[in-house]
Amino acid sequence: MTRLPTSLSLLSAAALLAAGAQAQCFTPSGTSVTGSLQLIDPGYNFPDDEGYTPPAPLGFTFPATSMVGAAAITLDHFVATTNGELLLTDSVGTGYSPLFEGVNSLAKLRGTPGECPRILPWSYDMADVGPGTWDMKVDQVAGVSTTVTWQNAGYWNSATEEISFSVTVDVNGTVKMSYAPTGWAGVPSSVGAFVGISSGNGVGTIASPGVDLSTGTATSSIGLIYQSFPAGGSGDLAGFDILFVPNGTGGWIETLLDCAFHQSYGNGCYTIAREAFYQLFPDTTSSNAALAGNSLNFAPVGAGYNVTLGGGVFRTPVTPNVLALTDDSEADVTPSTPFPHVGGPVATLSVNSNGTVNMGPVGNNEVDIYANTTALLSDPLAAFRSNRDYNPGAGGTVSWEEAASGADTVLYITFNGVFIYGTSSPETFQFQLTLAGPNAGNAQIVWTTMSTSSLADLVVGYAPGGGSIPPGSIVLASALPITTQPDVKPLTLTASPRPVITLGGTGPAALCTYTVSNVPEFDPINFPGVGAGALLWGLPGSQVPGGFDLGTFPSDIGMPGCSGYVFPIAAQVDISGVIAGGPGGTLSFSIAMPQPLTPGLEFYLQAIALLPAGTPATGSNNLVGTPYGARTSNGLIIHYENQ
């Protein structure tokens, strides 16, 4: 067993949170509506922006006694919208009309005579606009309940702020709304958001008052209960679970549930981007100056590429196979020999009309991309990119052919005089992928004619697929040569399922599995595949929400810029083990919990893994008094409750 240095026992000091952690029962689960129900395109936008499902069976009939004042509709179906609304209706959608751009007024919430009931966990103008993986999911227990989840829903005018939440309705007529603990900093628009329940059909009046749901004591005597969040206001429901119960006379009683949860806080160390790179050119003038007559060259080195600039030669197509590409389209190319990509041989590649060659067939990477750095970093397949908004349907051709180049066999994919979208400005460039021969696996992008008459931006670069740390735009002319290699990612510490206490709160707790991901190999030369490290365990009162610097306080252990999140440390649990697949491996384990466990009790965890000493540039530091380096994880709260 490899032991941690004793100086780690000096990690940090801080007090408990000023207030207790909020309950967090939100758990994204179910089947994606993009793969089952499908979202209907409203006709003027995309399905994931103002889209909605067709009427789908609830699996039961929602009691009319819970929706007093509603129109005479059998409530056995639902419609869910991308804007955070669940509408109850019948099989033909009686009383439903799309609430485009979210409910932003009391009038919309009340509805008009004949309109169906509506349940709003967070009604706002939302879409798939942020960096996270957007989805809407449906999870049903036949005859019992239906849950709709909105995951990483982005505000339409924000590319970074995303929220996740869900709503559950059941056969007893109760409604539960659950909110993820993060992402609720504000409502960034000229209009606000609405949360609540309305029987529709014009229930209430234009003066019906709102309530404060965060108190957990709100009530309503009619089929209308809501809170309005003004523009710029904070969504103060973060981390809560809200239960609405019919009062038996047509109104609602609202309470907050205390739920067991695991919650991450802080960030692990280190995060170093080195597997993807790109340059973003803001216009054609800059891209022409840098690229016309130039080339970008990729030579395989381990799991990455040595990237250099210049020296490539454009080959004029001789017997081209023209691809039937139009605006925003893609097509497969299957060469005679799989391309030996550093990530593995690729038998079928796909060519995007917007200037990318993807290491796999169509239907994987995004298509509608225009100098899109987010797609470059997040698409599942590796891709070589000279990505601009092109339209081969308006002018030019995209073709492929194989030919000998010395002792090599090369696949040439040529964009020949392809117009920039909305212009008659042609550009000509070529991807060259060496299939076989002494230089097998090499790749090049060679540019010849580049336009100077358009403001269209361009991104040139490469990412290995599957999600890369953003490296920021570089200047190819001065930053190259570089060698790409896997990103250095911090440890991530997660746990599931929720730590629910059984037997009246005295234990045992439900078995929880703790998982540390991105674990490095301890000594990849002498002990390949073996990881070493520990889990730092803190008792109640030991959480350090903001963290403390492991290079300065309480003593320098050699990890400046990294944070400790637990002090004092009650125990160090060995998590050494064999890692399947080497670097980036995963360790999973369970822990014997101290007894008795009581509702509201919290413990705190943080993981640390050892590896050969180095420098931050390689993802480790030299721990003081040891021959080791280390990486750390985020902190993790374990909060026990009875449910």
Image (cartoon, helix red, strand yellow):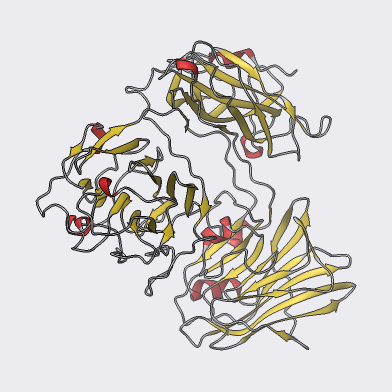
Location of the C terminus by quadrant is: top left
Q: Is residue 142 visible?
A: yes
- Count of numbered circles in the view: 0
Task: Tell me the quadrant of the picture where the N terminus can be found.
Answer: top right
Q: Nearer the viewer, residue 33 or 154?
A: 33
Residue drawn at x 53%, y 60% as measured from the top left = 36
| 182 relative to 196 in the view: left or right | right
From this viewpoint, is residue 191 visible? no
In percent of the image, x 72 and y 69: which residue is there?
349
Q: Position of residue 231 (x, y in %)?
A: 23, 51
User: Between residues 445 and 57, which one lies in front from this camera angle?
Assistant: 57
**Quarter-of-image position of residue 618:** top right
Rendered residue at 81%/67% (across/down): 338
- Across and down, in percent, residue 229 comes to 23, 47
- Quadrant of the rendered structure where residue 627 is? top right
Q: Along the line of sight, which residue is nearer the eye, 93 or 550?
A: 93
From this view, report whether residue 291 is shown above or below residue 112.
below
Residue 222: x and y, percent?
17, 45
Residue 112 lies, in percent from the top left, at: 19, 63
